[in-house]
Amino acid sequence: MIAIRTPEEIDGIRRSCALAANLLDALARWIEPGRTIREIDRRAGEMIRARGAKSPFLGYKNFPGHICVSVNEEVVHGTPRDARVQYGDLVSLDLGVVFEGWVGDTATTVALGEVSPEARRLMEVAEESLYFAIDKARAGARLSDVSHAVESYVTRHGFSVVREFVGHGIGRSLHEEPQIPNFGRPGQGPRLKAGMILAIEPMVNLGRPGVRILRDGWTAVTEDGKPSAHFEHTVLVTDQGPEILTVADGKAEEIQQKLKHGGGP
Ligand code: MG
């Protein structure tokens, strides 16, 4: 069963999502070449605690970090370590909070300085595919319409979607029903209803879709060693269309424009 949230529950999730978005925004601006991934994780943990929240990732199946930091060919679930991020890296940051009992979850990929044109394009297409898919999260649509939107957008632009990891429902727990793959035929699965809350998160590879897990048991990397990008929003289905909940202060207009252009020209 996919939960249908009451207005009070939605208010709670809305607050946790806004907090997650603000923290991710601040962290993304704080990162610079030379910082170690362990420092970035520690900083995120401090920021989350300073706001009276907790990380839903820390300790999840023994995950060792407050957030996931995944660099270049790392797809998702990168763990704290002493490696430094460098000029020219693509850095994916996945940040969740538990605040007053509700979870919010969001991710972005940032380029540190100049990256190759194809890496820049990968980031754009991955982000556009998220907005293209969010636009399909409408009452009356089917869940796989969202999944299909990611895949069709990404493949149309010559990149590939990761199939091993999925988006998810969210609420009291980080991962609730349903699972939201980033691929599939449209018109399948449950019908979306107002009050459902979905964390939609395309993971897009520049090369082939295959991934493998490093020896830390967590970090997923592309099998072909080419870069990957990851974007995520937590989204409320309403009778008036999708509403993105993970919006940082001052970013509402920008996000609304991206959603309106749902996947660019
Ligand atoms: Mg997620």
Image (cartoon, rainbow, N blue to C red):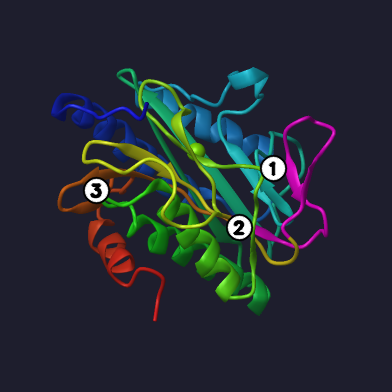
Q: Is residue 154 magenta?
A: no
> Which segment is the magenta one?
209-229
Q: Position of residue 155 (x, y in %)?
A: 60, 70
Which part of the image, by quadrant, shows the N terminus? top left
Give the residue at mark 2. 229
Q: Position of residue 172 (x, y in %)?
A: 37, 20
> Of the residues tagged 3 and 2, which is closer to the observer?
3
From the viewer's perspective, is 126 left or right of 240? Answer: right
Residue annotated with mark 3: 139
Identify whether 185 is placed above or below 174.
Answer: below
Count every numbered label the image shows and give the total: 3
Residue marked by disc 1: 36
Label 2: how many Cα within 10 Å (few below 14, some 14–19, many 20+) = many
Q: Secondary structure at mark 1?
A: loop
Three-letter amino acid code at disc 3? Ala
Q: CA distance from mark 3 to mark 1?
A: 43 Å
Q: Amino acid at mark 2?
A: Ala
Instruction: Give the Cα separation between the discs numbered 3 and 2.
Output: 28 Å
Closer to the chain start, of discs 3 and 2, is: 3
Q: Position of residue 186 (x, y in %)?
A: 45, 57
In magenta segment, residue 224: yes
* Label 3, residues with CA under 10 Å away: few <14, some 14-19, many ≥20: some
Nearest to the eye among marks 2 and 1: give it: 2
